[in-house]
Amino acid sequence: MMKKYEVGTIILRVILGITFFIHGLAKFQGGIENIVGWFSSMGLPGFMAYVVASFEILGGILLVIGLGSRVVAGLFVLLMAGATLKVKLAVGFLGNGQMAGYELDLAFLAMAIFIAINGSKLFSLDSLIVKGQKTNTTSL
């Protein structure tokens, strides 16, 4: 039973990581200055566009390789909650024709909450590091 659980968790972790990586990369490729202006128009500091996009890229990579998954997922929870409350809630669950709704954000939020609570050990650098530390301490 535990193996099925871990397989399901790694699927969530990797898909969430890839998705955030691509979203962060798209912000830079599409012109980060446009995102800076959009953040400013919502009353957020413009430099936060760089912070968010960079974190999406780095955090996405970290999730895919399984390094610090619980912490990264916890930060993604905060990011998705903020995005939903600040931007998407007003346009509704399915959106308004001009902007997508928060249904996908809610799915990402749920995935991130699951990983933040449970972690993901299968094929993760975290498990290799912990295994290496246990081996070193038991041989002392």
Image (cartoon, helix red, strand yellow):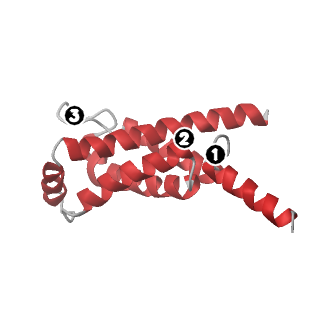
N-terminal-most mark, 1 or 2 = 2
Report, in whole angstroms, how far the alpha carbon at label 1 lies from the one at label 2.
7 Å
User: How dense is the environment of label 3, judged by Cα within 10 Å: few (below 14), some, or many (20 and up)?
Assistant: few
Q: In this rendering, is residue 115 above or below 101? A: below
Instruction: Kindly state the secondary structure of the residue where label 2 is placed.
Output: helix
Measured as percent of width and height from the top left, residue 8 is found at 63, 33
Give the left or right position of residue 88, taking residue 29 as reference: right
**Which residue position holds label 3?**
96
Q: Are marks 1 and 2 in contact (CB under 8 Å)?
A: yes
**Which residue position holds label 1?**
120
Give the left or right position of residue 134, taking residue 76 as reference: right
- Inspect the image, locate mark 3, and give the three-letter code of the amino acid beneath it: Asn
Report, in whole angstroms, how far the alpha carbon at label 1 lies from the one at label 3.
36 Å
Quarter of the image that includes the N terminus: top right
Instruction: Kindly state the secondary structure of the residue where label 1 is placed.
Output: loop
Task: State the image quarter where residue 134 is shown.
Answer: bottom right
Measured as percent of width and height from the top left, residue 116 is found at 57, 53
In this view, the residue in front, 129 or 54, is: 129
Task: State the image quarter where residue 4 is shown.
Answer: top right
Q: Are marks 2 and 3 in contact (CB under 8 Å)?
A: no
Question: Which label was assigned to residue 111?
Answer: none
Give the left or right position of residue 36, taking residue 5 as reference: left
N-terminal-most mark, 2 or 3 = 2
Tell which tag, 1 or 3, sits nearer the viewer. Answer: 1
**Which residue position holds label 2?**
13
Instruction: Kindly state the secondary structure of the residue where label 3 is placed.
Output: loop
User: How dense is the environment of label 1, judged by Cα within 10 Å: few (below 14), some, or many (20 and up)?
Assistant: many
